[in-house]
Each structure stands twice: as structure tokens, then as C-alpha cells.
Image (spheres, rainbow, N blue to C red):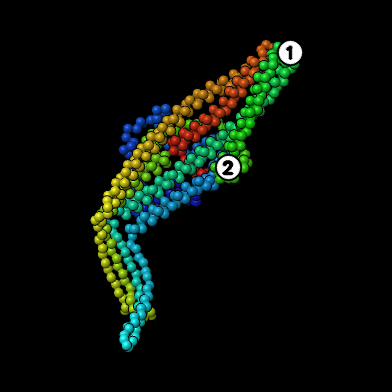
Amino acid sequence: MRVRVGKTTGVLVGWVLVVSGCSPWTASRSTGPLANGLPSTWSTDQAPSLGVDQEWIARFKDPQLIRLVEEAMNQNPDLKATAERVRRAEAVARLAGAGKKPQLSGQINTLQQKQRFPGFPIKLGSNTAESYGASLDVTWEPDLWGRVRASQRAAVVESLAQVQDYRAARASLAGQLAKAWFALGEAGEQIVLAEAAIDVRVKTVASIQERFAAALEGGLASQLRLAETDLASARASLARWQADRARARRQIELLVGRFPDGMVVEPAGLPVAPALPPPGLPSELLERRPDIVAAEQRYVAAGSRRSAARAARFPSFSLTGRAGTSTGALEDVLDSGFGIWSVAGRVVQPLVAGGRLREEEKIAGHDETIALRELQGTILRAFAEVEQALVAEQFYAARELAVRSSARSARQAAEASILDFADGAVDALTLLAAQDRQVQTAFQLVTLRRLRLENRINLHLALGGDFQRRAAR
């Protein structure tokens, strides 16, 4: 799978192999021991389907949502900052490998020196001397103990972890935008229901007022006040959902990277929940989830930094060489007849550093242990998120089925109560109760549909589902 970072077309692993020759570093895995003892299937899904759905945004069959997500991939400032961190980590990795190579520098120097010879009582005069030179200097420190290699390996693996952070941020952004889009769709449907409820409440209040004015049965003052209360509650619900719609619009614009002026065109309504994605095997999650891979890479990087700290306690060797010219005449600076050269070697062994090197190695060891525990915690949380999303999906499906049945019965009861009230067969309290139950179950069903869609997004993210641009397919 290729990962886009702004204009970058893929994970830049090629330069890692060229600059550092470190293909074993990126190929090694550290989660093997952690995968021991994992169940063969999820506890709530016994079908070990292979793979994960990378087209999950398209599964909702909403072209406008797809366009918004793609716009967010290009315009969201937080995602751009994450992409820049990837590029910075790549530069740090390249910089870490510079210490392995010989360092070449050139210099040109000039010196004018005047010396006076005082005397008494006679002045003996002065002497002026000029010196010019040019040289090329080479310095190289052989990495005998692997300190520089370990530091470079840590930087390279850290850059790969940043790439995984970018993948996680991109998928999270797509998920947040989809949830905000569905919240906007829910608000639109709830507003329609609230407006319909207001119309019904207005007619009910008018009907009860007529009976109250005529002093007929079913026109008691208390029942009229209850009807007016239900009407006011319906208007309050409308205002609430209108506020939620405005808030969702601005949230979407913020995620997309636009000015939040509330001009987003809302969807026609909530889509039907698509089919469940293939959950795959629990062990496959270790390969798919970007946060797990990032935590694993940081554990590897911590181990490399510990190796570098250990190697810093060993002697260091350096070789220096110089070749150039030295002359008293400027025009002879480039004349090889005035050439000079030198070669030197140096061995440095830390003797007394106040325990600094030993403590630095201990600190690096603690950092490695911390990274391991964080990796274990990330894996456990990932498994829990998948299990929770799968369990919630089962209960949401059962709840939606029950609420649909309840809403259908409540609607039929409300329609029947209107006819019965007109015929005088029931009082206003029965009518109001039936209408209230119809409104509440309708509201509940829309909210439940939105929650089920959100849980479906959570399941896709928990399984490591990435967002794929249409141009990359």
C-alpha cells in the first residue's frame, strides 16, 4: 500500500536503503513475541475473513462525502503539519547517517606579520613576513562499535513511525469528517420530524381549545395546558436541532480547512448502513493498525538508541589528513612545488565522566522498556476497540430492529387516537400520550441510525482501514 504525504507519492523507503543500507531494520518485526497466545478469531465474530476494507468511505454511497474527505486530505492544516513532521523526520534520518562518511573541507589562509626590533640608543628596525596557503582537510571516524549506525537506525525507524502517524491521522480525519457529516444528516432529519410534530401539536391544541371553549368532555383546562406544554417542547426540540445543524456545518468546514461560515450543503439524510467489513484475524491487526506499527517502530528505535549509548563508552578512533601548499607569495599558492601534507590518527577513551555515560545507558534502557510497555498497551487497546465495535454492532442492529417496530406501532397508535378523539372515544390525555410516543420513538430511531453509522466508522478505524483517494486506485 502506498501512503501519500502531501505531494509525496509514497513512503520514501528507497532513500533509506540507499543512504543507510538498512533493509534489515525496516523488515524486522518486534511484535512476534507479543502475538503469542492471541485467539484465532474475535470473540464476537467467528468468521476469519482476510483483509480490511480500504474503500470504507465509498461504501456509504455518498459522493458529496467523498469529495469533502478528499478536500480535507489536501486542505486540513493539522494533517499538513503531520505531513511536514514526516519530512522533518526523513531529514533527521539523513543527517544521522552523515557521521559515517569522511568529512572533506577546504580552506585558504593568509597571514601578514610585522616584528619590530627595538634598540637603545639605536633602533635596529623591523621585519614584515607574509604567508599564504591552501589545503584540503579530510576527517574520518571509523564506526568500529556501531554507535553512529545505531543512531542512524534509530532515526530511520523513527521516520517510519512518523509515516505511520500520518496514516493514522489521515484515517482519523476521514472518520471525524464522516461522523460530522452524519451528525448533519441526523440534524436535518430531526428538524423535519420536529416541524411535523409542531404542526400536529398546533392542531391538537386548537382541537382541545375548541372543546374547552364549548365545555365539552375532553376539553379540561389541565389537558389544554398539557397540549400547550407539548407544543412548546416541540418548538424547543426544533431549536435544538437547528443549533446542532449549524454546529455540524461549521465542524465540517473546520475539518475540511475552510472558513467556518456554515455554508455547507447538508445531505438528503442518513444513508443505510453498509455491510460489515471483514474483521480478519486478531494477529493481522498487528500488521494493519498504523498506531501499532508506529509504537513498534518506536520500540525498535529505543533499542537502537540504547545500543548507541552503550557504544559511546568504548574508545573512538579518528583519522585526519591534510594536503595543500604554503608559500610567502600569493601567486604561488596553487603551485604544487610548495606542497605540504600531513596524516594524523587519534584514539580517545573516556576515563572519568562523572558517571554520565553509564547513566545515559541506563536512561536509554528505561526508555526502551517504556516503549515496550507502550507498545503492549497500544496492542491491547486496539484489540479492545475491535471487540467493542463488533459487540456494539450486534446490539445496535437489535435495537434498531426493535425501535423500528416500536416507531411503527406508535405511529399507528397516534393515527388511531386522532380518530378516536374526534369521535369522543378517548380523552385528550390519551391523544397527547400517543402523539408524544410517536414523536419520541421517531427521534430515537434517527439518533440510533446515526449511532450505528458512527460505530461502523469506529469499526473500520479499529481494524486499520485507511482512506484511499480515488486517484490512487
Assign a secondary structure to mark 1. Answer: loop
Residue 435 visible in this rendered orientation of the protein = yes
User: Would you say the residues marked 2 and 1 are in contact, meaning their CB atoms lie under 8 Å apart?
Assistant: no
**Count of marks overlaid on the render:** 2
Q: Is residue 109 rendered to the left or right of residue 174?
A: left
Q: Residues within 10 Å of mark 2 (few under 14, many from 20)?
A: many
- Residue 333 shows up from this direction: no
Q: In the drawing, does residue 253 fall left or right of residue 113? A: right
Residue type highlighted by circle 2: Glu
Of badges 2 and 1, the one in the foreground is 1
In whole angstroms, how far apart are the C-alphas of marks 2 and 1? Answer: 55 Å
Residue at the far right in the pictured view: 214
Q: Amino acid at mark 1?
A: Ala
Quarter the N terminus occupies: top left
Residue 144: image location, x then y, percent: 26, 56
> Based on the displayed image, in which of its 4 quarters is residue 97 positioned?
bottom left
Q: Which residue is mark 1?
A: 215
- The numbered mark at residue 23 is none
Q: Residue at x 33, y 44 (%)?
A: 367
Residue under the point 59% across and 43% down = 260
Residue occupied by mark 2? 253
Percent across and percent down for residue 470 are: 52, 44
Q: Earlier in the sequence, mark 2 or mark 1?
A: 1
The residue lying toward the viewer, choosing from 471 and 392, is 392
Q: Is residue 225 above or below residue 84?
A: above
Q: Where is 111 relative to 464, above or below? A: below
